[in-house]
Image: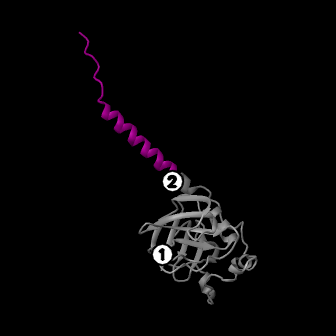
Amino acid sequence: MPVPARRLPSWVWVTGLTTGAIAAVAVLTVRAEQGPHPTASAARASASASASAAPDAKASASPKASASPAATDVPKASGTGRRVVYDLSDHRVWLVDADDTARRTFTVWPGTVAPAPGTYTISVRKDATTGSDGVDIEHIIYFSVVSGVNIAFSNAVDGSSPPPAASGTRTGGIRMAKADGAALWAFGDLGTKVRVVA
């Protein structure tokens, strides 16, 4: 008399399929990291040129300028690989390629709420919206939240600098010149590392 074939329990199938899916995602992630990535070298207009070209009086304010030529060097404690580096004390951003070469650096206008030093990833990208100061902004790249305040890079659509924040206003927008915003938008894919240093 033939013995009926035993069927595997459903949890065995689910576990096997889940394990296979995780392995496939891991392989694809490794291949994506090794593949080509866009660089910021295509947009090399300087931040000072783009800021001075702004048409209105609000643009006369400029981001904090550093007198030291070494300020353009990527901070040593900023990690390795392809990343965006944001220096809180110097108000400066670097776009760094996978070979640790800085393709672009520029100064920014920080908000009143700052992220803690550490490593983050770009989690949301938004083409355009209106900032909490009522200014139309574009190239919004979110990477952190501090006490309910979203921390994001952006630039004003009209190229102006942000007005001083009203007393007690909590803003997490890190504004930059229009050309720098376009370069960061081209460089900063979802999942790109953002390294914040003090």
Numbered circle sitting on residue 30 = 2
Compared to residue 13, the image places residue 54 above or below, namely below
Q: Give the range drawn in magenta.
A: 1-29
Count of numbered circles on the image: 2
In this view, which residue lies farthest toward the top?
1
Q: Which of 55 and 50 is in front in this view?
A: 55
- For badge 1, the amino acid type reads Ala
Does 19 lie within the magenta span?
yes
Residue at 35% over, 36% down: 14
What is the crowding at mark 1: few (fewer than 14 residues within 10 Å), some, or many (at least 20)?
Answer: many
Q: In this view, does 46 lie to the left or right of 175?
A: right
Where the N terminus falls, by quadrant? top left
Disc 2 marks a residue whose amino acid type is Val
Q: Where is residue 109 in the image (x, y as percent from the top left)?
A: 59, 78
Which residue appears farthest toward the left when viewing the image?
Answer: 1
How many C-alpha atoms fall within 10 Å of the one at disc 2: few (<14), some, or many (≥20)?
few
Which secondary structure is most common in the magenta stretch?
helix
Query: SS class of the residue under badge 2?
Result: helix
Question: Nearest the camera: 53 or 132?
Answer: 132
- Given residues 108 and 157, the one toward you in this image is 157
- Whether residue 14 appears in magenta in the rendering, the answer is yes
Left of 1 or right of it: where is 15? Answer: right
Residue 33 vertical placement versus 15 (above, below): below
